[in-house]
């Protein structure tokens, strides 16, 4: 029994007459003091074990330690009130019996002429005497002694007392025969607590009834003894079966403890626990535990301590699992919110070529995560769906406008190609022609994308004419190479959806090429250091020097190309800024 059990039992007992349950309350108080002392000593020993001094130890009561004394005080107050009332009742009963004794004394000293009123009065006094029951033991014995003495005196004084005595014997016989019937009825009852209580009451009544008629004495005594023995055997059999039932209950609880132990070992030794199944198993064990009745008292404390210990392990593990789940759910909640935020930013950017693939990736990522709170999960799903619908609706509208724009751009480029073909160029003035060509290229590049199926055809037709014009001009080799290189890049850019990436890639390639050539020159210089005393006409020296000159020429060509690429990158950035 723990403090909560004591509190509940005290509350129940406060609803009952205090005098009837005083013994049980006293036992509960002893049990509580035993529990409190054990907790106090344990706390004190822990304080000392942790380095404290016994004289410095203070003990703080629990809320139960405050409640139990309050309940005991209420009971003591109630018991005091009932005892006071009982004392008053006993005093009043003593006064009444003393008054009856006075009447009986007068009756014993009366000059009997007519026995009938004497017997009647005596019967009245006897009936009243029997009705007055509650007395102090000492008062009862003394009053009963005086009462019996006066009865004996009356019997001696009345010659007709035989008639009265015979009447009493007959009446007592009837009363005892009625009580024997009640004893027999006890054998039919299944409420053993009631049997015990009634048996005590009936025996007390039996002892208060006087002698019976002699011819019935042996029969009544035999029946009384036989019924008492049968009732005793019935109670003994019940208590024996009760002990057997308690032993069976003990075995059932041990089986449940073993099952609970296996579950707690699983929780402690395995991180990947299927908690839904564990919870169902523990709840089933707890339900079965509550259904099992009493067990032998000597095992009660040990069994309950084991049960509570295993439950503590289970609830601690369950709490930690819930904390992990909560943490994971918070992470998922944050991931989903981040995806929503990213989707909102993408919608604000309004760049469908760049973001369409990312939106599809976001949708796939979203499917990986689920919140246990269905209402919250549904709400976020609805918000996410609305954002996706908004993006793809805007994308459909954008695609529709872009298709029309590409068709318009195709018309413009075809018109420009027709204009290029119809234009008469003065090849005797190459600089003027080059400027005209660049204007055409600039205008061609400024026109946006055309339908993908027409792109290569339009680009080939335009740049074929451009390259034809370059070929017709009388240009230096260096300038021709630069123009053809730039024209090649411009054609590549027109055919690509990522023109700036092409330029960056080309820039990286050229820088790598220049670095390789410069490293080669460094190696030649290192080699020439071995020939510093050689004659200028030395073949090896001359060959190395010529190779170095040739590589320097290549470096200059690549640097010229690098300048072209950088210039085009600058033009591209400027055009992007203007577009923005």
Image (cartoon, grey):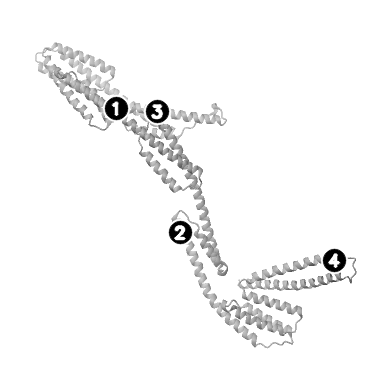
Front label number (2 vs 1):
1
Residue under circle 4? 528
| Label whose residue precedes the other's in the sequence (2 or 1) | 1
Question: Left or right: where does residue 464 sit relative to residue 159?
Answer: right
Question: Left or right: where does residue 556 sit relative to residue 456?
Answer: right
Question: What's the CA distance linking mark 2 and mark 4?
Answer: 77 Å
Residue 294 visible in the picture? no
Residue 482 visible in the picture? yes
Question: What's the CA distance linking mark 4 and mark 3?
Answer: 112 Å
Give the numbered dot on residue 236: 1
Residue under circle 3? 29
Question: What's the CA distance linking mark 2 and mark 3?
Answer: 57 Å
| Label whose residue precedes the other's in the sequence (4 or 3) | 3
Q: Tell me if mark 2 has few (under 14), some (14-19) or many (20+) residues whose alpha carbon lies within 10 angstroms of its own.
A: few
Residue under circle 2? 379
Q: Position of residue 78 (x, y in %)?
A: 34, 29
Question: Left or right: where does residue 471 sit relative to residue 30?
Answer: right
| Label whose residue precedes the other's in the sequence (2 or 3) | 3
Where disc 4 sits, the SS reads: helix
Task: Note whether 528 is above or below 266 in the view shown.
Answer: below
Q: Position of residue 428 (x, y in %)?
A: 74, 87
Front label number (2 vs 4):
4
| Residue at the outermost left position | 114
């Amino acid at each position: 029994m723990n403090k909560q059990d004591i509190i509940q039992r005290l509350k129940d007992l406060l609803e009952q007459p205090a005098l009837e349950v005083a013994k049980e309350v006293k036992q509960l108080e002893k049990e509580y003091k035993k529990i409190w002392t054990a907790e106090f000593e344990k706390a004190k020993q822990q304080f000392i074990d942790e380095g404290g001094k016994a004289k410095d130890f203070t003990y703080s009561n629990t809320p139960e330690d405050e409640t139990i004394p309050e309940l005991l005080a209420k009971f003591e107050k109630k018991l005091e009130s009932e005892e006071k009332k009982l004392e008053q009742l006993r005093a009043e009963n003593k006064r009444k019996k003393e008054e009856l004794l006075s009447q009986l004394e007068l009756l014993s000293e009366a000059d009997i002429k007519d026995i009938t009123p004497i017997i009647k009065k005596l019967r009245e006094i006897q009936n009243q005497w029997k009705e007055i029951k509650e007395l102090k033991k000492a008062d009862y014995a003394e009053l009963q002694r005086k009462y019996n003495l006066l009865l004996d005196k009356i019997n001696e004084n009345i010659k007709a007392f035989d008639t009265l005595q015979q009447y009493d014997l007959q009446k007592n016989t009837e009363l005892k025969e009625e009580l024997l019937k009640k004893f027999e009825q006890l054998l039919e009852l299944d409420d053993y607590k009631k049997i015990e209580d009634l048996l005590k009451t009936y025996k007390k009544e039996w002892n208060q009834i006087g002698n019976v008629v002699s011819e019935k004495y042996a029969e009544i005594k035999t029946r009384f003894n036989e019924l008492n023995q049968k009732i005793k055997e019935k109670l003994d059999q019940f208590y024996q079966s009760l002990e057997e039932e308690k032993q069976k209950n003990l075995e059932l609880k041990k089986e449940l403890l073993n099952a609970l132990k296996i579950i707690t070992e699983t929780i402690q030794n395995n991180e990947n626990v299927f908690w839904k199944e564990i919870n169902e198993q523990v709840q089933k064990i707890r339900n079965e535990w509550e259904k099992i009745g009493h067990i032998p008292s000597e095992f009660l404390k040990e069994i309950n301590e084991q049960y509570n210990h295993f439950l503590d392990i289970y609830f601690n593990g369950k709490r930690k699992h819930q904390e992990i789940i909560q943490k994971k759910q918070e992470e998922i909640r944050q991931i989903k919110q981040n995806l929503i935020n990213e989707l909102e930013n993408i919608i604000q950017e309004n760049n469908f070529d760049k973001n369409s693939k990312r939106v599809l990736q976001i949708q796939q990522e979203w499917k990986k995560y689920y919140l246990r709170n269905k209402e919250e999960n549904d709400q976020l799903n609805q918000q996410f769906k609305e954002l996706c619908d908004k993006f793809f609706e805007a994308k459909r509208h954008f695609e529709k406008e872009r298709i029309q724009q590409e068709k318009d751009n195709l018309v413009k480029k075809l018109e420009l190609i027709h204009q290029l073909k119809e234009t008469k160029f003065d090849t005797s003035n190459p600089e003027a022609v080059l400027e005209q060509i660049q204007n055409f290229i600039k205008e061609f590049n400024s026109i946006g994308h055309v339908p993908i199926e027409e792109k290569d055809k339009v680009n080939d037709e335009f740049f074929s004419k451009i390259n034809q014009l370059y070929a017709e001009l009388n240009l230096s080799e260096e300038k021709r190479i630069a123009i053809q290189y730039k024209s090649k890049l411009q054609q590549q850019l027109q055919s690509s959806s990522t023109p700036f990436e092409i330029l960056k890639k080309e820039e990286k390639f050229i820088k790598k090429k220049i670095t390789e050539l410069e490293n080669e020159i460094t190696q030649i210089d290192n080699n020439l250091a071995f020939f510093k005393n050689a004659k200028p006409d030395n073949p090896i020296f001359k060959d190395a020097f010529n190779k170095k000159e040739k590589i320097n020429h290549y470096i200059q060509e690549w640097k010229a190309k690098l300048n072209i690429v950088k210039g085009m990158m600058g033009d591209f950035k400027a055009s992007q800024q203007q577009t923005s």
